Amino acid sequence: MPAPNIETIVGLAKRRGFVFPSSDIYGGLGSAWDYGPLGVELCNNVKQAWWRWMIYERDDMEGLDSSIIQNRLVWKYSGHEETFSDPLVDCKKCNSRWRYDKLEPSEDAKAVGYGATESTVQSGLFKCPSCGSTDLTEPRPFNLMFRTTIGATAEEDDPSALAYLRPETAQGIFINFQNVLTTMRRKIPFGIAQIGKSFRNEVTPGNFIFRTREFEQMEMEYFVRPGDDERVHQEWIDYCMNWYLGLGLSADNLRLYEQPPEELAHYAKRTVDIHYRFFPEREDADRQWDELMGIANRTDFDLRAHSKKPENEEGKRLNPDSTEDLSYFDEATRERFYPYVIEPAAGVNRSVLAFLMDAYTEKTTDRDEKRVVLKLHPDLAPIKAAILPLARNKPELVGLAKAIKRSLQPILRAVYDDTGSIGKLYARQDEIGTPFCVTVDHKSLEDEAVTVRDRDTWEQKRVAVADLAEHLQSRLKVPRLSSQDTGQTSVLDLDK
Ligand code: ATP
């Protein structure tokens, strides 16, 4: 049973230290969130899982970390300056502003099956979500890029100092295509992956961490020969879906959504989104879903757009500012061409929200008490094991529990806690998704064994302290690299 709505997760996230409203002591800042001690671990685990799956487990991938602030020309030639906008409408009655393609249809609009388009908004079929008025302005484009100026002497309106915070990580990959290709001696097909912050001045951010103005993306650009693009695109759609399934998202809450031609971005030949059921409480089944990840066939649009060579019909260079040609020479066929690009693009924060919602479970104890259990995949769980002494006023138990925690911490994320009764401590760890609680009791001092409690089944098992690390590691099913290759006992050594 996943969370019944996002609100349930907002409460849990704040109560347990995953996510806090940002700038709260100054009244907050709309839709900005800070990740607390458990939230930062969860985000890092999602990113590590993605990086490992995307780069380490494949032979055809390189990583990159490009600048957030780039030359403004990057955004001119990528098309973002001109087209990276959302359609904005104002409510003439209460002056609030909305993205018209996200307006909720009125009953009248639903009856005739209308979506929000320019004409349906104008004909009064859509209402202001704030005051209910149908008196809305005509939609107009609102560019989503955050502007800034570079340099200490720059005037606010000096166009030569204008720069943007990147609205996607992808362009940093395109402008480095030749650098990576040549330094890493790659041949297509191959991909370049990047994780990093992006910024969009969203018209209507909201729904907790689902849509914010500052967020983190995990993007990969996969370069292929034109003609192979459609097949490879389909392969990536399946591969990405499997990544989410493999990390525990339920198939019932995932679906593929084929973007219709009118929704496609200016560069895309075909885009398929992976949708998650973020809004299960909504009556209209179709409105329960929204995008978790987009997988686009970007064609050769970006590499061409950033290249100095391509010319229009009159022989004029389309990009007179670029100093590079980003085409590719195929040694085998002696051909030069611009590779096509398949792009899986996911949000870290939206993925975190989906993982939290899907892991949320309620369980009833023998005493008829309701407990929340967060059944996160062990790879994602912020803490892998909590070491709990049965009595905190017994120095021998405390000493042994702390020693066990210290022995585990080089290989997995473990915590020690003695701030409540054992029942309370279990409940707290269940609620934050810790797969195992390790209890040190009076008998432990004699038999040198501890009780390992499973988060999902609440089953308990006696395990010798000497075998504990091995035991936990095998049950956490952490993927291991060969110890000869790494010189490490476990991949977790690299993890933390
Ligand atoms: P949407 O239609 O929801 O605005 P998009 O199609 O513009 O999203 P992409 O440009 O495809 O999004 O970005 C890739 C991924 O980045 C999205 O699938 C989403 O997970 C994440 N993302 C995009 N915008 C935001 C945002 N404002 N806040 C949080 N995550 C975002």
Image (cartoon, rainbow, N blue to C red):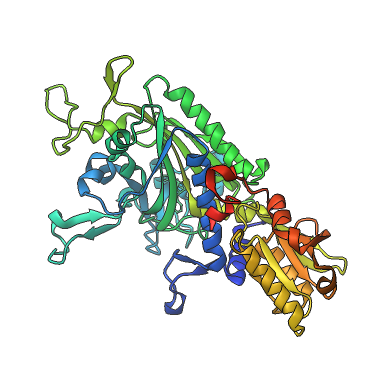
Nearer the observer, 326 or 266: 326
Please give the name of the residue rendered at 52% of the width and 33% of the height, measured from the top-left corner.
Answer: 237
Nearer the observer, 52 or 220: 52
Count of numbered circles in the view:
0
| Residue 235 screen position, x and y as percent | 52, 28
| Residue 368 screen position, x and y as percent | 85, 67
On screen, residue 337 versus residue 117, left or right, reads left
The vertical placement of 238 against 193, above or below, is: above
Instruction: Spot the residue most to the top.
Output: 333
Q: Answer with the quarter of the image where residue 485 lies.
A: top right
Q: Report whether residue 125 is seen.
A: no
Q: Report whether residue 85 is seen.
A: yes
Q: Answer with the quarter of the image where residue 440 lies.
A: bottom right
Please give the name of the residue rendered at 80% of the width and 68% of the height, measured from the top-left corner.
Answer: 448
| Residue 233 screen position, x and y as percent | 47, 28
| Residue 267 screen position, x and y as percent | 34, 34
Q: Answer with the quarter of the image where residue 32 lies.
A: bottom left
On screen, residue 355 versus residue 82, left or right, reads right
On screen, residue 54 versus residue 153, left or right, reads right
Nearer the observer, 324 or 483: 483
Please give the name of the residue rendered at 50% of the width and 35% of the height, measured from the top-left corner.
Answer: 58
Instruction: Spot the residue most to the right.
Output: 366
Please give the name of the residue rendered at 43% of the width and 56% of the height, measured from the top-left corner.
Answer: 215
Nearer the observer, 258 or 295: 295
The vertical placement of 485 against 300, above or below, is: below
The vertical placement of 138 against 59, above or below, is: below
